[in-house]
Image (cartoon, rainbow, N blue to C red):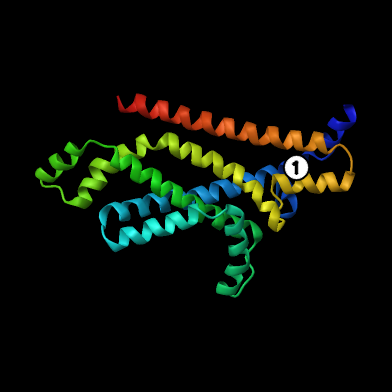
Amino acid sequence: MIANITVITDNLDYLLLGRAAQGEPGGVLLSVLMTLGAALLAFPGGIALACLAWRFKGWPRRVLFAWAEIIRGIPLIFVIFWLWFLLPMLTGADLPGAVTVTLALAWFTSASVMYSTLAAIGSLPRGQHEAALAGGFSSVQLLRWVLLPQALRNALPSYVGLLIALLKDTSLAFIVNVPELTTVAGQVNNRVQVYPAALFIFTGLVYYLLCTLLEHAVKRWQRRSLLAAQ
Protein backbone atom coordinates (compact mmCIF):
# COMPACT_ATOMS: atom_id res chain seq x y z
CA MET A 1 0.00 0.00 0.00
CA ILE A 2 2.84 2.39 0.87
CA ALA A 3 4.46 1.62 -2.49
CA ASN A 4 1.17 2.41 -4.24
CA ILE A 5 0.98 5.81 -2.57
CA THR A 6 4.64 6.45 -3.34
CA VAL A 7 3.99 6.04 -7.05
CA ILE A 8 1.43 8.82 -6.80
CA THR A 9 3.37 11.16 -4.52
CA ASP A 10 6.58 10.78 -6.55
CA ASN A 11 4.74 11.86 -9.70
CA LEU A 12 2.17 14.21 -8.18
CA ASP A 13 3.53 17.38 -9.78
CA TYR A 14 3.49 15.73 -13.21
CA LEU A 15 -0.04 14.39 -12.69
CA LEU A 16 -1.29 17.81 -11.63
CA LEU A 17 0.67 20.16 -13.89
CA GLY A 18 2.45 18.14 -16.58
CA ARG A 19 5.47 20.10 -17.79
CA ALA A 20 3.97 23.50 -16.99
CA ALA A 21 7.36 24.76 -15.85
CA GLN A 22 8.62 24.22 -19.42
CA GLY A 23 5.57 25.94 -20.89
CA GLU A 24 3.74 22.67 -21.63
CA PRO A 25 0.79 22.35 -19.23
CA GLY A 26 -0.59 18.88 -18.72
CA GLY A 27 -2.39 16.64 -16.27
CA VAL A 28 -5.17 18.17 -14.20
CA LEU A 29 -4.21 21.69 -15.27
CA LEU A 30 -4.63 20.91 -18.97
CA SER A 31 -7.91 19.06 -18.37
CA VAL A 32 -9.30 22.14 -16.60
CA LEU A 33 -7.99 24.52 -19.27
CA MET A 34 -9.57 22.47 -22.07
CA THR A 35 -12.85 22.34 -20.16
CA LEU A 36 -12.91 26.10 -19.69
CA GLY A 37 -11.90 26.78 -23.29
CA ALA A 38 -14.54 24.43 -24.70
CA ALA A 39 -17.21 25.84 -22.37
CA LEU A 40 -16.44 29.42 -23.40
CA LEU A 41 -17.06 28.40 -27.01
CA ALA A 42 -19.86 25.84 -26.62
CA PHE A 43 -22.27 27.66 -24.31
CA PRO A 44 -22.41 31.08 -26.03
CA GLY A 45 -22.37 29.30 -29.40
CA GLY A 46 -25.13 26.87 -28.47
CA ILE A 47 -27.29 29.63 -27.00
CA ALA A 48 -26.81 31.73 -30.14
CA LEU A 49 -27.81 28.77 -32.32
CA ALA A 50 -30.90 28.23 -30.16
CA CYS A 51 -31.88 31.87 -30.64
CA LEU A 52 -31.48 31.51 -34.39
CA ALA A 53 -33.55 28.31 -34.42
CA TRP A 54 -36.29 30.03 -32.40
CA ARG A 55 -36.26 33.21 -34.47
CA PHE A 56 -36.13 31.73 -37.98
CA LYS A 57 -38.60 29.06 -38.95
CA GLY A 58 -38.58 26.97 -42.11
CA TRP A 59 -35.36 25.76 -43.70
CA PRO A 60 -32.89 27.62 -41.38
CA ARG A 61 -34.44 25.87 -38.39
CA ARG A 62 -34.43 22.51 -40.18
CA VAL A 63 -30.76 22.93 -41.11
CA LEU A 64 -29.82 23.71 -37.51
CA PHE A 65 -31.79 20.73 -36.18
CA ALA A 66 -30.27 18.43 -38.79
CA TRP A 67 -26.77 19.60 -37.86
CA ALA A 68 -27.45 19.11 -34.15
CA GLU A 69 -28.93 15.64 -34.70
CA ILE A 70 -25.92 14.55 -36.76
CA ILE A 71 -23.46 15.85 -34.15
CA ARG A 72 -25.33 14.28 -31.24
CA GLY A 73 -25.61 10.98 -33.09
CA ILE A 74 -21.86 10.65 -33.65
CA PRO A 75 -19.54 9.41 -30.90
CA LEU A 76 -17.35 12.21 -29.60
CA ILE A 77 -14.22 10.15 -30.23
CA PHE A 78 -15.00 10.28 -33.98
CA VAL A 79 -15.41 14.06 -33.88
CA ILE A 80 -11.98 14.36 -32.25
CA PHE A 81 -10.43 12.12 -34.91
CA TRP A 82 -12.06 14.02 -37.76
CA LEU A 83 -10.91 17.42 -36.54
CA TRP A 84 -7.46 16.01 -35.80
CA PHE A 85 -7.02 15.15 -39.48
CA LEU A 86 -9.32 17.74 -41.06
CA LEU A 87 -8.17 21.00 -39.43
CA PRO A 88 -4.55 20.77 -40.70
CA MET A 89 -5.92 20.23 -44.21
CA LEU A 90 -8.16 23.31 -43.92
CA THR A 91 -5.70 25.62 -42.17
CA GLY A 92 -2.49 24.40 -43.76
CA ALA A 93 -0.87 24.19 -40.34
CA ASP A 94 -0.70 21.70 -37.51
CA LEU A 95 -2.69 22.95 -34.55
CA PRO A 96 -1.68 21.93 -31.02
CA GLY A 97 -3.46 18.77 -29.97
CA ALA A 98 -5.08 20.47 -26.97
CA VAL A 99 -6.55 23.15 -29.26
CA THR A 100 -7.95 20.54 -31.64
CA VAL A 101 -9.57 18.57 -28.82
CA THR A 102 -10.96 21.76 -27.26
CA LEU A 103 -12.58 22.71 -30.57
CA ALA A 104 -14.02 19.20 -30.94
CA LEU A 105 -15.45 19.30 -27.43
CA ALA A 106 -16.95 22.73 -28.04
CA TRP A 107 -18.49 21.71 -31.37
CA PHE A 108 -19.94 18.53 -29.89
CA THR A 109 -21.32 20.20 -26.75
CA SER A 110 -22.84 23.20 -28.52
CA ALA A 111 -25.49 20.96 -30.10
CA SER A 112 -26.69 19.83 -26.67
CA VAL A 113 -26.60 23.41 -25.37
CA MET A 114 -28.80 24.43 -28.29
CA TYR A 115 -31.39 21.76 -27.50
CA SER A 116 -31.38 22.55 -23.77
CA THR A 117 -31.88 26.26 -24.45
CA LEU A 118 -34.69 25.68 -26.92
CA ALA A 119 -36.42 23.36 -24.47
CA ALA A 120 -36.17 25.98 -21.74
CA ILE A 121 -37.61 28.66 -24.04
CA GLY A 122 -40.42 26.33 -25.11
CA SER A 123 -41.36 25.57 -21.51
CA LEU A 124 -42.21 29.21 -20.74
CA PRO A 125 -45.90 30.17 -20.60
CA ARG A 126 -47.31 31.13 -23.97
CA GLY A 127 -49.07 34.10 -22.41
CA GLN A 128 -45.75 35.89 -21.99
CA HIS A 129 -45.25 35.82 -25.76
CA GLU A 130 -48.67 37.28 -26.42
CA ALA A 131 -48.44 39.93 -23.70
CA ALA A 132 -45.02 41.15 -24.86
CA LEU A 133 -46.06 41.28 -28.52
CA ALA A 134 -49.27 43.09 -27.58
CA GLY A 135 -47.15 45.58 -25.63
CA GLY A 136 -45.22 46.50 -28.78
CA PHE A 137 -42.19 44.26 -28.41
CA SER A 138 -40.62 42.94 -31.59
CA SER A 139 -39.81 39.24 -31.76
CA VAL A 140 -36.12 40.03 -31.15
CA GLN A 141 -36.97 42.18 -28.13
CA LEU A 142 -39.30 39.46 -26.86
CA LEU A 143 -36.50 36.95 -26.99
CA ARG A 144 -33.83 39.27 -25.62
CA TRP A 145 -35.70 40.86 -22.71
CA VAL A 146 -38.46 38.41 -21.80
CA LEU A 147 -37.80 34.83 -22.82
CA LEU A 148 -34.04 34.35 -22.83
CA PRO A 149 -33.29 35.55 -19.27
CA GLN A 150 -35.89 33.17 -17.87
CA ALA A 151 -34.83 30.32 -20.15
CA LEU A 152 -31.18 30.60 -19.17
CA ARG A 153 -32.10 30.47 -15.50
CA ASN A 154 -34.36 27.45 -16.00
CA ALA A 155 -31.75 25.66 -18.12
CA LEU A 156 -28.97 26.12 -15.57
CA PRO A 157 -29.27 22.57 -14.10
CA SER A 158 -28.99 21.17 -17.61
CA TYR A 159 -25.99 23.40 -18.32
CA VAL A 160 -24.28 22.15 -15.15
CA GLY A 161 -24.73 18.57 -16.32
CA LEU A 162 -23.28 19.43 -19.72
CA LEU A 163 -20.32 21.21 -18.12
CA ILE A 164 -19.57 18.19 -15.92
CA ALA A 165 -19.83 15.90 -18.94
CA LEU A 166 -17.47 18.24 -20.77
CA LEU A 167 -14.89 17.93 -18.01
CA LYS A 168 -15.08 14.14 -18.06
CA ASP A 169 -14.95 14.05 -21.86
CA THR A 170 -11.53 15.71 -21.83
CA SER A 171 -10.22 12.25 -20.92
CA LEU A 172 -10.84 11.22 -24.56
CA ALA A 173 -7.92 13.44 -25.55
CA PHE A 174 -5.67 10.49 -24.80
CA ILE A 175 -6.50 9.05 -28.23
CA VAL A 176 -4.44 11.81 -29.88
CA ASN A 177 -1.83 11.79 -27.11
CA VAL A 178 -2.76 15.15 -25.59
CA PRO A 179 -1.15 15.13 -22.12
CA GLU A 180 -4.28 15.66 -20.01
CA LEU A 181 -4.85 13.77 -16.77
CA THR A 182 -5.72 10.35 -18.23
CA THR A 183 -2.80 10.49 -20.66
CA VAL A 184 -0.19 11.44 -18.07
CA ALA A 185 -1.52 8.77 -15.70
CA GLY A 186 -0.99 6.24 -18.48
CA GLN A 187 2.49 7.59 -19.12
CA VAL A 188 3.42 7.23 -15.45
CA ASN A 189 1.98 3.73 -15.41
CA ASN A 190 4.01 2.74 -18.50
CA ARG A 191 7.16 4.16 -16.96
CA VAL A 192 6.92 2.47 -13.56
CA GLN A 193 5.09 -0.62 -14.90
CA VAL A 194 3.64 -1.41 -11.47
CA TYR A 195 0.64 -0.41 -9.37
CA PRO A 196 -1.73 0.65 -12.18
CA ALA A 197 -4.72 0.35 -9.87
CA ALA A 198 -3.41 3.05 -7.53
CA LEU A 199 -2.79 5.47 -10.38
CA PHE A 200 -6.16 5.06 -12.00
CA ILE A 201 -8.06 5.09 -8.72
CA PHE A 202 -6.30 8.39 -8.03
CA THR A 203 -7.25 9.62 -11.51
CA GLY A 204 -10.90 8.68 -10.98
CA LEU A 205 -10.97 10.40 -7.61
CA VAL A 206 -9.53 13.57 -9.14
CA TYR A 207 -12.25 13.64 -11.81
CA TYR A 208 -14.89 13.03 -9.13
CA LEU A 209 -13.50 15.82 -6.95
CA LEU A 210 -13.35 18.28 -9.85
CA CYS A 211 -16.92 17.50 -10.92
CA THR A 212 -18.20 17.80 -7.35
CA LEU A 213 -16.44 21.12 -6.80
CA LEU A 214 -17.75 22.43 -10.12
CA GLU A 215 -21.33 21.46 -9.29
CA HIS A 216 -21.05 22.96 -5.81
CA ALA A 217 -19.60 26.22 -7.17
CA VAL A 218 -22.38 26.64 -9.73
CA LYS A 219 -25.12 25.88 -7.17
CA ARG A 220 -23.60 28.35 -4.74
CA TRP A 221 -23.46 31.01 -7.45
CA GLN A 222 -27.09 30.25 -8.34
CA ARG A 223 -28.23 30.66 -4.72
CA ARG A 224 -26.40 33.98 -4.43
CA SER A 225 -27.93 35.19 -7.68
CA LEU A 226 -31.43 34.33 -6.47
CA LEU A 227 -30.86 36.10 -3.15
CA ALA A 228 -29.54 39.17 -4.95
CA ALA A 229 -32.57 39.26 -7.22
CA GLN A 230 -35.01 39.23 -4.29
Q: Residues within 10 Å of mark 1 (few under 14, many from 20)?
A: many
Image point (72%, 37%), residue name: 203
- x, y percentage for residue 106? 51, 53
Task: Name the image quarter holding residue 89.
Answer: bottom right
Classify residue 17 as left or right of residue 61.
Answer: right
In the depicted structure, whether residue 153 falls above or below residue 101: above
Judge whether 143 appears above or below 124 on screen: below
Q: Is 160 left or right of 202, judged from the image as shown?
A: left
- Residue type at numbered disc 1: Leu
State which quarter of the image contains the N terminus: top right
For the C terminus, the image quarter is top left
Looking at the picture, how far across and down is residue 133, in whole percent?
13, 45
Residue at 66% x, 52% y is 173
Q: Is residue 178 visible?
A: no
Look at 25% across and 47% down and name the residue there: 143
Residue identified by numbered label 1? 15
Whether residue 37 is visible, yes or no, is: yes
Horizontal relation, residue 53 to residue 203: left or right: left
Circle 1: element type: helix
Image coords of residue 4 (percent x, y): 86, 32
| On screen, residue 159 above or below 100 | above
Identify which residue, 116 or 37, lies in the foreground.
116
Front residue of 198/36: it is 198
Picture mark count:
1
Residue 126 position by quadrant: top left
Q: Residue at x 69, y 55 (%)?
A: 175
Foreground residue among 20 and 192: 192
Rendered location of residue 135, percent (x, y): 10, 43
